[in-house]
Image (tube, rainbow, N blue to C red):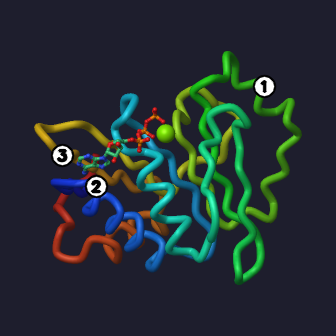
Amino acid sequence: MTELWLPDVDATDALGARLALTRPAQAVVHLHGDLGAGKSTIARALLRALGVQGAIRSPTYTLVERYPLAEGGEAWHLDLYRIADPGELEFLGLDGAEVRLWLVEWPERGVGALPAPDLTIELSMRGPGRIARLHPGSSAGEAWAGRATPGHEVAGHS
Ligand SMILES: Nc1ncnc2c1ncn2[C@@H]1O[C@H](COP(=O)(O)OP(=O)(O)OP(=O)(O)O)[C@@H](O)[C@H]1O
Ligand SMILES: [Mg+2]
């Protein structure tokens, strides 16, 4: 687990951009945290750094927003806050085969209907800023967290 102090929104944006630059070819990210913790901020920074131009809409009502990537494939940004049951996700008939990057807000509401995370990012408020905890869920995710946060890696896992 790697813990980072994000004193302001610029620090959250910078973390998103570093994660984009260092990402593996295929990755699933679960974003945990209370309302307003900064999940969408990180997702938007990642998508911007991947070259997405124009509006990055919140998927709160659509559940998923899809973005084609220059390299091919797509990045998907999901926000499952409003789903009542993970079955609603299967109802959308989402085929994730071409998805290079999953960014999932409120993944706890889609349990059983989502791919397992390579990286779980847990955001919490502290004073005027945020704490980000990176929990790798795979060896690819562990290497990614190390690349994205050089010098921050903490011994031991959780
Ligand atoms: N490190 C930070 N320090 C202070 N404020 C921050 C930081 N990172 C993000 N913010 C601010 O916190 C708010 C977070 O909003 P955001 O929409 O990203 O939250 P969210 O976790 O996606 O919430 P929701 O569950 O409602 O989707 C924004 O106003 C953003 O500017
Ligand atoms: Mg959000």
* Mark 2 residue crowding within 10 angstroms, few (<14) / some (14–19) / many (20+): some
Q: Is residue 10 toward the left or the right of residue 102 in the image?
A: left
Which of 11/117 is in front? 11
Alpha carbons under labels 3 and 2: distance apart:
8 Å
Q: Quadrant of residue 55?
A: bottom right
Give the x, y percent position of residue 81. Answer: 57, 27
Few, some or many residues within 10 Å of mark 3 (<14, 14–19, 20+): some
Is label 2's Cβ within 8 Å of ligand 1?
yes
Q: Residue at x 71, y 50 (%)?
A: 65
Disc 1 residue: CB within 8 Å of ligand 1: no
Q: Residue at x 28, y 55 (%)?
A: 9
Which residue is at a point 70% across and 25% down the rendered structure image? Answer: 86
Q: Ligand 1: does it lie within 8 Å of the C-beta at label 3?
A: yes
In the image, what residue type sits under mark 2?
Val
Q: Which residue is mark 2?
A: 9
Residue 66, horizontal then vertical, whole percent: 73, 56
Occupied quadrant, residue 26:
bottom right
Q: Is residue 103 left or right of residue 7?
A: right
Which quarter shows the N terminus? bottom left
Q: Earlier in the sequence, mark 2 or mark 1?
A: 2
Cα separation between marks 3 and 1: 34 Å
Going from the N terminus, do you reach mark 3 or mark 1 first? 1
Comparing 65 with 155, the one in front is 65
Residue to which mark 3 is pinned: 129
Q: Which residue is mark 1?
A: 88
